[in-house]
Amino acid sequence: MEMILGAQMYNLRQFTQTERDLDLSLKKVAAIGYKTVQISGIGNIAAGRVRALCESYGLTIALTHMNPDRIMYDTDAVISENETMGCNYVGIGMMPERYRCEAWLDQFITDYTPAAKKIAAAGKLLMYHNHEFEFAKINGKRVMEFLMDGFEPSLMGFTFDTYWAQAGGADLYEWIGKLKGRLPCVHLKDMEVLPDRGVVMSPVMEGNLNFPKILEALKADGGVKYLLIEQDHCRESPFICLEKSYRNLSALGYK
C-alpha cells in the first residue's frame, strides 16, 4: 500500500482561525506538494467550507481531531461533519486529563465505546493519538495496552506519534509491531537535542530519530495509509518546517 504524505494543520493553528486564513494556508500547503491534510486546531469553520477549500487546492482530508467531549456526547454530529469533509478517520488528539489515573482509566473505555461503535457503524474509525503518557504503567500495565485490549481493532485505530513514543521511552519498532493492522494514520515528528535547549521537536529527518528504519517498519505493517507531518512547536516558520519535512521525505521517494 502506498503511504501518502500529509500535513497536520495543527502545525499552522495560528494561521487557520478564519476562513480566509485557512484558505491561504491550504494554498501554501498544496504548493509544497502535499496532497492530503489532517484537520485539527482550525477556527469555527463549517465542514462543507473546509472541504471546499481543500478541494480547491487538490487536497483531501485524511484525518480529523475532534473535541473528545463532542465525540462522546455529540457523536452523530461529529460523524456528519466528517462525512461532509469526506474523512473516514475521526481522531481523539489527547485523552482528557480526568481519565489519566488508576481510578478512572477503565472509564475511558466505558465512556467511548458507544461512540466508537456508532462511528464504526457509519463506516469510519475512531483513532487515538498518543503522547508520552500512554507508555506509563498503571498497575503494571501500560496505558497503550489498556487501550489496545479495551477496544477491538474494528472500533479503534491508533495514530502513532513517533516523537511522543520516543519521549515515553518506548521502543518505536516494537510498538509499530504491536500495533500492526491498527495504524492507518501515523504522525511523523523528529526529536533533536540542542546544547542550550535540550530536547526539542524538529522537521522529519533533521533530528535523531532513525526515519529510514521507522519508515521500513511502517511499510512492513502493510496497512499504513497516511504519513502525517506534525511539529507542534517550531523554531522557525511552521510553513518552512512542513516544507523541510516534505523535501526530506520526498528524497526517499514518498509523496
Image (cartoon, helix red, strand yellow):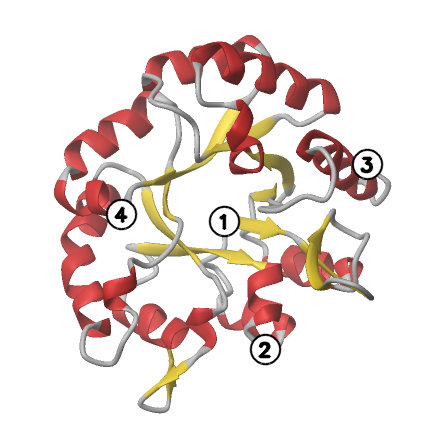
Q: Secondary structure at mark 1?
A: loop
Nearest to the eye among marks 1 and 3: give it: 3
Query: Whole-Å distance between the Cαs marked 3 and 4?
Result: 33 Å
Residue 58 at least partly seen: no
Number of labels in the image equals 4
Taking 163 as reference, is 92 above or below it? above
User: Tag on residue 247?
Assistant: 3
Q: What residue is disc 2 on?
A: 169
- 62 vs 7, left or right, is left
Amino acid type for the residue under numbered disc 2: Gly
Q: Secondary structure at mark 3?
A: helix
Query: Whole-Å distance between the Cαs marked 2 and 4?
Result: 26 Å
Query: Whole-Å distance between the Cαs marked 1 and 3?
Result: 22 Å
Q: Residue at x 81, y 52 (%)?
A: 206
Callout 3–callout 2 Cβ contact below 8 Å: no
Please state, as top left, top right, bottom left or bottom right, where the C terminus lies in the image. top right
Mark sitting earlier along the chain (4/1): 4
Nearest to the eye among marks 3 and 2: give it: 2
Q: What residue is disc 1 on?
A: 184
Taking 172 as reference, is 161 above or below it? above
